[in-house]
Structures are given as C-alpha cells and as structure tokens.
Image (cartoon, rainbow, N blue to C red):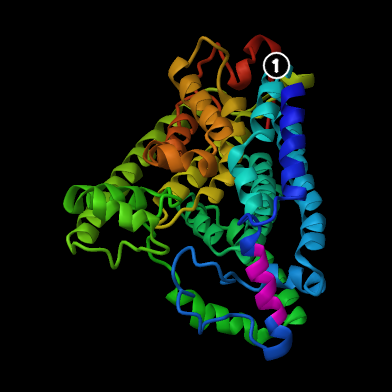
C-alpha cells in the first residue's frame, strides 16, 4: 500500500496543479465555454462549429445533465473549478470501491489485491485529464450491479422492486452520456422487464433537473436534432473498439503504413470517409462476423453457466465467508455485458474503460482459489497488469499499435472469464470450490 499511496499522491498533485501549457482539462475548458455562451446566446450546443458532429471533437455534445452541474460554477476560473471537481472524483472512486467490497466480501488477501488494482486503475486517471464523467458512471453502474446481485434472478415482489431500483442508476448514467443506455438491451435479452421502468425513471429525473436549470427546449434540441447525427467510427488510436481496431488493420493492408499513419494522427479521420473505399465494407463485414460469433458464444456459455449454477442455488456463511452465489452470478453476467458492449461499440474511447474496473473486481471475487482455473487467473491478472501499468497517454506515442491492440481486446478477456461455468458464473468452479476460494464446508444452504 505504501507505493500505491505515493503514486496516488503524485497523480493527485499533478492533476491538482498541472504544468502550464499542457492539454489537461482542455475538454472541461471547452465545456465551460459553451455553458458561458448559453448565458449570452441562449444556446448550449455549438452546432455551427465545423467538427461538432465528428467523434472526438472537443465540444460539448452530451445531454444537458453535466452542463446543468457545471452552470452554477461556470463564472469561476478553470483552476478553482478543477479543485472543486477533483475531490468529488476521488470520493466517487473510494465510494465505488467501498460499495463493491461491502457486497462482495472477499477474503482479506484477495480484498487487498482488489484494492491495489482498483486504486491504480489507469483508465480512471486518464479520464481525469479531460474531467470526463466515467468515474461517476462507474459508481452508478456499480450500484446497479449490487442491486442486481441482491435481486439474484429471483421472482417475487421484493426482487422486482430491487430490479426497478437497479435501473434507476443506469438511467442517470445514460443522462450523463448516452451510451450506457445500450446496456438496456442486456435486460431485454435476460427478460428483466422491471429494470426498464427504473431506467426510464432515472432518466426522467435527470431531464426534470436539466429542464429546470436550462429549459425543456434544450433537451428537445439534443434528442431530436443533435443525437441522431452523432456517431461514426473514429480511426484514432484512442478508439479501442473492435470496429476501430479492424478499420486500422484493414487500412494498413489496403492503404499501407503511410495511409494508416495519416488516419490515426489526423484530428477526426473516420472509417465512413477513409480511402480506399474498400476499407469500410471490409471492416464492417469482419466486425459483423465477430459480433455474431460472440453472440453465439455468449448464448452457449450462458446456458452452461446456468446449468452449473443450479448445483448451488444460494449459499451463505459467516464473516467474510458469506457469499450469495446467485447474486455473484448476476453481477458476473452484468459485468460480462459491460465488457461485450464496450468491445462492440463503433467508437469506444480509452476513458470508457474506467467502467471495466467493475467487472474486473467481480472477476477477482468470483474466481476459485489458486491453483484452480489457472487460465482465468492468468487473463484477469493480465488485464489488471495492463490497466495498472499500461498508461495509454504515456506509451501510445512509442508503442501505440501494441497498446491499442491490447486495450481493445482487454474487455473480451474479462468477458471470457466472467462467463466461465461455475457456481457463481465466474471461474471454473466445482462443488469443491466456491467463488472467492471459499470451501463448501464453511457454508450452509439458505432457502429462498
């Protein structure tokens, strides 16, 4: 913990007082500028800017929720605002860690390993450079995951209430950035219908807040005029999606290194407009084959997980030995859905991988004790190692290809582990080994 504390201190100090001339907080500065323009012009979104609709352009093109949070402090200078927001982000990080540890109750040694991984999670620190919203979204998704764990796939009024409340944080996350709404498809596939009204309720609460802060017309403009025009697939190295990775690979094969270098270093080069023209349909075809293959594998593995989890529907014990196997299974499936979603999005920026801290901790908690499931342990440790030591912003200039490839496939490695057959749906468990390395001799079955 001592090296971790020193590292966190140095990172916090850097973010608290960054050197002059750096690009850190450039996004936040642009967002504040647009909030200030609203006070003068009555318009929040700078749609007249040439690159407004391009992926990665440094303009405010989220729902008005974050702008409503920034508006009360918009008159201040940038540095005082940053010094208000940084402690909030650190508090969100610690609160997320506390929520997950309290529910998962890992053994002490494993808990310490999870804490060290979480506090050094590189994507979180990368997201602070642009003061992005992923730390808040990580907490919201973690609360949803815990509520889903408590619901545990049961069918009774209490479980339906938990499913509803599990949707509310997801609706709030979608109101910050739209892309979390894509996770609603997971609940449709799982037929968890009570989660969907919860998502709508959380989203409605955020809309009411933004309408009172700005006007209802701002929300109408965003969701009817702006959102339908957003999208596309960036070829920049910071897009670590399957389609972005395949687009760069196909461009290298068809256009050569010079064409690839121009695409990845240009400001907003997109797959939809890149030359030669064969790059886009080829990349889309390969990504489509990959998505269909993953859908088939997910369905197949889900059936095996379901069958294996029936061996121990629900178990509990004393102290840190307590484990709800069905709850852990639900959290594992939700974590696997997050991994798959980030992998298959057309544009998945590196800071989005802040959210992978949730499935990583669930995977650590669910794996059986070593030396069982050596392959799963190896994948999880590799993911943790790359997320802790693989600073995208520091290494991408020297080893951009290797870093981009690994960070692209990192969610898929976690997905594979989380859908391993076992009592908790995570790890190659057996009747002799429960998730977290717990022994059945220390647990008793609990009736629903």
Which of the two residues, 42 or 366, is positioned nearer the viewer here? 42
Tell me which corner region of the image, top left, top right, bottom left or bottom right, holds residue 320: top right
Which of the two residues, 230 or 340, is positioned nearer the viewer here? 230
Tell me which corner region of the image, top left, top right, bottom left or bottom right, holds residue 442: top right
For label 1, the crowd category at 10 Å Cα-Cα, with few meaning under 14, some 14 to 19 and many 20 or more, is few
Quadrant, the N terminus = top right
Left or right placement of residue 311 versus residue 216 in this view: left
Which of the two residues, 86 or 173, is positioned nearer the viewer here? 86
**In this rendering, does residue 428 appear at all?**
no
> Mainly helix, strand or loop, the magenta region?
helix
Image vertical order of residue 233 relative to residue 115, above or below: below
| The stretch drawn in magenta includes residue 33 | yes
Q: Which residue is painted at 36% across and 52% down in the image? A: 244
Q: Which residue is painted at 55% across and 64% down in the image? A: 178
Q: Which residue is painted at 74% across and 18% down in the image? A: 108
The residue that mark 1 highlights is: 109
| The stretch drawn in magenta includes residue 325 | no
Which of the two residues, 391 or 101, is positioned nearer the viewer here? 391
Image vertical order of residue 279 relative to residue 65, above or below: above
Query: In the rendered picture of this protein, how many numbered marks are placed on residues?
Result: 1
Residue 203: horizontal and vertical position, in percent?
65, 68
Left or right placement of residue 286 versus residue 182 in this view: left
Left or right placement of residue 106 versus residue 57 in this view: right
Tell me which corner region of the image, top left, top right, bottom left or bottom right, holds residue 196: bottom right
Please report the bounds of the magenta region as a residue range: 28-36
Residue 330: horizontal and vertical position, in percent?
57, 39
Quadrant, the C terminus = top right
Question: At numbered mark 1, what does the secondary structure look like: helix, strand or loop?
Answer: helix
Residue 302: horizontal and vertical position, in percent?
42, 37
Q: Which residue is painted at 68% across and 52% down in the image? A: 140
Residue 349: horizontal and vertical position, in percent?
49, 53
């Amino acid at each position: 913990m001592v090296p971790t504390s020193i590292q966190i201190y140095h990172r916090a100090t850097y973010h608290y007082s960054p050197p002059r001339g750096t690009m850190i907080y450039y996004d936040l500065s642009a967002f504040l500028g647009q909030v200030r323009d609203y006070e003068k012009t009555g318009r929040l979104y700078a749609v007249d800017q040439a690159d407004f609709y391009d992926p990665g352009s440094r303009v405010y093109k989220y729902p008005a929720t974050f702008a409503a949070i920034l508006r009360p402090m918009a008159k201040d200078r940038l540095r005082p605002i940053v010094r208000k927001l940084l402690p909030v982000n650190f508090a969100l990080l610690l609160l997320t860690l506390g929520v997950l540890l309290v529910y998962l109750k890992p053994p002490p040694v494993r808990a310490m390993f999870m804490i060290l991984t979480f506090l050094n999670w590189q994507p979180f620190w990368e997201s602070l450079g642009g003061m992005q919203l992923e730390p808040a979204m990580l907490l919201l998704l973690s609360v949803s995951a815990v509520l889903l764990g408590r619901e545990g796939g049961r069918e009774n009024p209490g479980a339906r209430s938990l499913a509803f409340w599990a949707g509310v944080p997801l609706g709030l996350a979608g109101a910050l950035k739209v892309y979390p709404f894509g996770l609603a498809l997971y609940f449709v596939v799982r037929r968890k219908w009570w989660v969907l009204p919860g998502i709508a309720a959380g989203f409605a609460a955020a809309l009411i807040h933004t309408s009172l802060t700005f006007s209802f017309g701002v929300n109408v403009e965003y969701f009817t005029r702006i959102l339908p025009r957003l999208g596309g697939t960036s070829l920049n190295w910071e897009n670590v999606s399957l389609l972005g990775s395949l687009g760069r690979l196909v461009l290298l094969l068809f256009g050569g290194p010079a064409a690839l270098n121009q695409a990845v270093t240009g400001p907003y080069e997109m797959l939809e407009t890149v030359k030669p023209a064969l790059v886009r349909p080829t990349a889309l075809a390969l990504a489509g084959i990959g998505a269909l293959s993953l859908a088939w594998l997910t369905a197949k593995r889900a059936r095996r997980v379901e069958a294996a989890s029936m061996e121990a529907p629900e178990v509990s014990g004393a102290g840190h030995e307590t484990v709800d196997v069905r709850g852990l299974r639900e959290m594992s499936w939700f974590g696997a859905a997050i991994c798959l979603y980030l992998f298959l999005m057309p544009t998945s920026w590196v800071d989005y991988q802040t959210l992978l801290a949730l499935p990583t901790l669930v995977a650590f908690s669910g794996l059986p004790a070593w030396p069982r499931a050596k392959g799963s342990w190896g994948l999880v440790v590799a993911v943790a190692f790359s997320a802790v030591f693989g600073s995208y912003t520091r290494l991408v200039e020297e080893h951009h290809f290797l870093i981009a490839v690994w960070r692209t496939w990192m969610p898929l490695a976690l997905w594979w582990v989380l859908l391993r057959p076992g009592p908790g749906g995570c790890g190659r468990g057996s009747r002799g080994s429960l998730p977290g390395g717990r022994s059945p001799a220390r647990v008793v079955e609990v009736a629903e």
